[in-house]
Image (tube, rainbow, N blue to C red):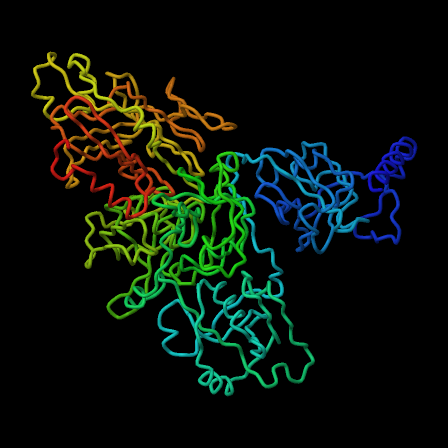
Amino acid sequence: MEKSRRRQRLAFSLLFGLWLPCCLAQTTPSHAATRTPTRTPSPSPTPSPSPSPQSQTARLKVRLSGYPRKHNEGRVELFHKGEWGTICDDDFSIHNANVLCRQLGFVSATGWTHSAKYGKGQGKIWLDNVQCSGGEKSVEFCKSRGWGSSDCTHDEDAGVVCRDERIPGYVDSNVIDAQVDEKKIEEVRLRPVVAMSRKKPPITEGVVEVKFRDGWAQICDLGWTIKNTHVVCGMLGFPHERKVNKKFYKLYLERQKNFFHIHSVACSGTEVHLAACPLEFSKPNATSTCEGGTAAVVSCMPGPLFIHNTGMKKKLKTSSNVRLKGGAVVGEGRVEVLKGSEWGTVCDDRWNLQSAGVVCRELGFGSAKEALTGGRMGQGMGPIYMNEVKCIGHERSIWNCPFKNITSEDCQHVEDAAVRCNVPHMGLEDSIRLTGGRTRYEGRVEVLGSDSNGTQSWGLICGETWSTKEAIVVCRQLGLGYANQGVQETWYWDSSNVTEMIMSGVKCTGSEMSLSRCQQHKTVSCQKAAAKFAAGVICSDTTSDLVLNAPLVQQTVYVEDRPLHMLYCSAEEDCLSKSAAKANWPYGHRRLLRFSSQIHNIGRADFKPKAGRHSWVWHACHGHYHSMDIFTHYDLLNANGTRVAEGHKASFCLEDSDCEEGVSKRYECANFGDQGITVGCWDLYRHDIDCQWIDITDVKPGNYILQIVINPNQEVSESDFTNNAMKCNCKYDGHRIWLHNCHIGDAFSEEAERRFEKYPGQLNNHIP
């Protein structure tokens, strides 16, 4: 029936479009359109004479919705005049889908859907009879009946299927979000009453209040359940709830004047936001809005990261078989699960907020703020253990949820699932700021301190020893993503009258939540105390992540006795052990442990040398430039962790040796070209090139550990430095060498890593 109507409409358009162009151009303006009682063929759509005011001032927001779906498919929804709405499938085509997919950050469309395949939308149907040519920058520039003019129902909502390849540089999220009507509830908070609750953040107990107009209003506690409390605690960043002393609060609240905006709440307990629960709002003219009740009060249990009491921290344990990797701030990252002794990832098929919420609470955070798909937090390198996870939301662990086991045909790491969890407000961003930068992501770091009188004033941080690790903490504390660079001189960002150094000797591990948790001098000591030598940072939404191909190292290892007359250049670049200087050059040889290194960039930004090409060092012997003095460390360790032999590799040629399907190479060293590693590509250092070895001439037979560390000085920003090291068990009999159990540093469980360190025969350093 629908197809027949469409054929009639097309015939009508073709017939009358030839002799009535003037009439067809006079379509009813969108603001005057009304829904007709019966459906009739519509005239051919015409382009608007000029873009809408929205398109002139801001980019049209587009999102994918519905269920079940993956991150690159779904019902199309547009945000217009403050409201989300859908597109009718009449006259929809692959050209429309291409335009919409590009707006969503994908390179193109592979298909489109009709008849509300991803479920029926709600609210407005914003566009109908959309006809794009395919080259438009936005669907709003395509021909259509105009905004809000439609004779469709939500049974005809259109959807798109986009090619799962992102437009380079596009940073908007692959996000499956709550999509709740937050206009009903703008903001929720706990107003502390007990003095202890006010002392240190986070606030875990108090009266539940919602933002209303210019103030705050309460919720009536009649019919209030533990499920409601569970939802409130979750959205405020807490995994669990606890009992409240109702008698105390009743006495307190009876003396308070309350304004009840919400009369009742009926959450199921799995919602990610209070606005997603069935709510009954108080009527404006009601004489009594909460008769027999009082204001709702909740008490939440924070996760271990947010507890000040060390004794309580020990009692609360988070899951040991689930973790988040690659996130910029606390409570976000790629979901990884432990099976047996090896960590693996979760495929994003059917990944949603309920499953993401189970992971978040399992790890000591609140409910899920966002469920991310498409490798949004970088790609893992190990196995993929789970697919189509279907949590209800009450489960204690993601392992308790139904899921499908994975085959290599089902999913690839480009589909790794990730989460952003609700975390408690700690107020950490209030004590630090950036000034003088060109954007809010960069600038000189200023921290809030107190003088001897207890008066707060802003001050600077000494730039000496300031590095990427400290910058990571600053960017995390400010919620500005990853650290691109730590800057030791900031004379070009001088824009405030703050000149006093109040912090020095700052040394962070990179995992701290704030600078105050890093080591620092008790008394400020800074040799270069001028403001131009104050510390600064450059933050970024995205960054790289380098990982070594561990199996390739194991497959390509061998021993070579190389004549000294072939090693002059290598000696010049310090690639041989110290004893080589005492050798009888050019006679004799060096024994070299050789292997190939394939280094992948699995992050979300290209890996590029910190130094610009103007400062690269030319090495005439090998005839190439070094963009980084040390790109990798190669070490052979004994049972005590002491180096018995070492090597290093300067980045004489950071380039894209090869890439994943659909990814183009960008970096090539030839002709003084740009150096770097593109996302989805890898740089291959073959076993037969100079310095791709460890000189083991002086090493005795025995059992050792081979360790390779990429970007060892952390000169270049990465989302995860814990996966930069690779280790192998190594057995050397004086003539031949074997590698076993090669793995990325954080790929094994703690127990498996302990077993690895106790490699049989290693303790006595003899061949068994």
**Residue 762 seen in the current view:** yes
Quick check: 78 left or right of 499? right
**Location of residue 514 (image quadrant):** bottom left
x, y percentage for residue 448?
Answer: 33, 61
Residue under the point 20% across and 24% down: 575
Q: Is residue 213 above or below residue 102?
A: below
Q: Is residue 75 above or below residue 632?
A: below
In the image, farthest residue toward the front: 768
Quick check: 715 left or right of 421? left
x, y percentage for residue 335?
Answer: 44, 48
In the rendered picture of this protein, how many numbered marks are placed on residues? Answer: 0
**Location of residue 289 (image quadrant):** bottom right
Quick check: 435 left or right of 741? right
Q: In which quadrant will I find the N terminus?
A: top right
Residue nearer the viewer, 503 or 688: 688
Q: Is residue 499 above or below residue 583?
A: below
Quick check: 34 left or right of 586? right
Residue under the point 84% across and 47% down: 28
x, y percentage for residue 499?
Answer: 30, 54
Q: In which quadrant will I find the C terminus?
A: top left
x, y percentage for residue 238?
Answer: 44, 64
Residue under the point 26% across and 27% down: 649
**Residue 58 seen in the current view:** no
Residue nearer the viewer, 123 or 23: 123
Q: Is residue 247 above or below residue 479?
A: below
